Image: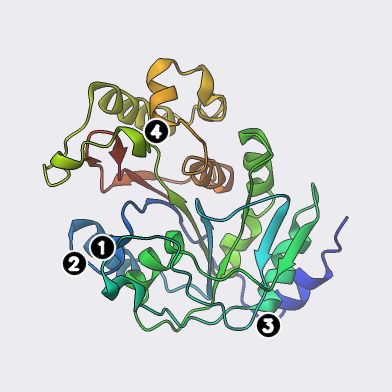
Amino acid sequence: MASLDPFYHWTKSLTQEDTEHPVLFIGHGSPMNGIEDNVFSQTWAQFGRDIPKPKAVIVVSAHWLTSGTHITAMDHPKTIHDFGGFPQALFDVAYPAKGSPELAKATASLVQSTNVGLDHDWGLDHGTWTVVRHMYPNADIPVLQLSIDYNKPAQYHFELAAQLKTLRKKGVLVIGSGNMVHNLRMVAWDRLQEDNYGFDWAIEMNAIFKEKIASRDFKSLIDYEKLGSAAKLAIPTPDHYYPLIYTLGLQDDKDEIAFFNDTLVGGSLNMTSVKFG
């Protein structure tokens, strides 16, 4: 088991805050949202202005899937362009936020259910920087990523996240970045520009997800495979869904729950996002 000493070392100079930082699940959608000025990116930018400025940001991105759990621990994480077929302007983006090896060690020390590896090779993938660059355009806040062990079920991720709740009172903003409804094979590419267009099953699941989250029926969300045929279409693979599970594990029973960017895109995707706290 990891010692908690690194956490105490990292936090000893910090003031315990009276209120917890919120936890955000953000539907990040297309990488183009990273450079476009649209309703999604405008909402992310508004959050950056409205919520207390964090001392650091940790993102659980749908695009860092690993064997085992890891956290970025370098001083200067690189900007990863993990996509293809987009305009050069998207590939030209660099988000030069610093990392925090100290926070990486501190976060790893909080997790007692598994060993969390300290990673020096990854960086910030598009699930992270396309969102965070709108929230904190000056790149003046350390940003880390926590990986998703793709060999583990939803319950594992929920329980791991619950061990990180202390971070919320130490000035750390935790973001889960994915999409609840994410079926790229079924996207109606010719209807991407249509406002809030969703297939019947996507509309159904978007409503179910919101109802389960609002009522704190987290067991049903963890056991998502039992939610029926619409759920199987919405979550053909759980990579974009697991970041939501992390935010559920990090929430507190007294947190207010608010939905934002509640929109369907291209029939088989949604941007629906959640703020806890």
Residue 169: % across, % down: 58, 63
Per the model, the C-alpha gap separating discs 1 and 4 is 24 Å
Q: Secondary structure at mark 3?
A: loop
Q: Pointer 3: what residue? A: 13
Three-letter code for the amino acid on which mark 2 is drawn: Asp
Q: Secondary structure at mark 1?
A: helix
Say whether marks 1 and 2 touch (CB < 8 Å).
yes
Three-letter code for the amino acid on which mark 1 is drawn: Ser
N-terminal label among 3 and 2:
3
Per the model, the C-alpha gap separating discs 3 and 2 is 38 Å
Image quadrant in which you'd find residue 195? top left
Total marks drawn? Answer: 4
Q: Secondary structure at mark 4?
A: helix
Say whether marks 3 and 1 touch (CB < 8 Å).
no
N-terminal label among 4 and 3:
3
- Would you place residue 163 above or below residue 263 in this image? below
Residue drawn at 45 percent across, 62 percent down: 82
Q: Which label number is shown at residue 215? A: none
| Relative horizontal placement of residue 118, taking residue 195 as reference (left or right) | right
Three-letter code for the amino acid on which mark 3 is drawn: Ser
Per the model, the C-alpha gap separating discs 2 and 4 is 29 Å
Between circles 1 and 4, the one closer to the viewer is 1
Q: Pointer 4: what residue? A: 214
Q: Pointer 1: what residue? A: 41
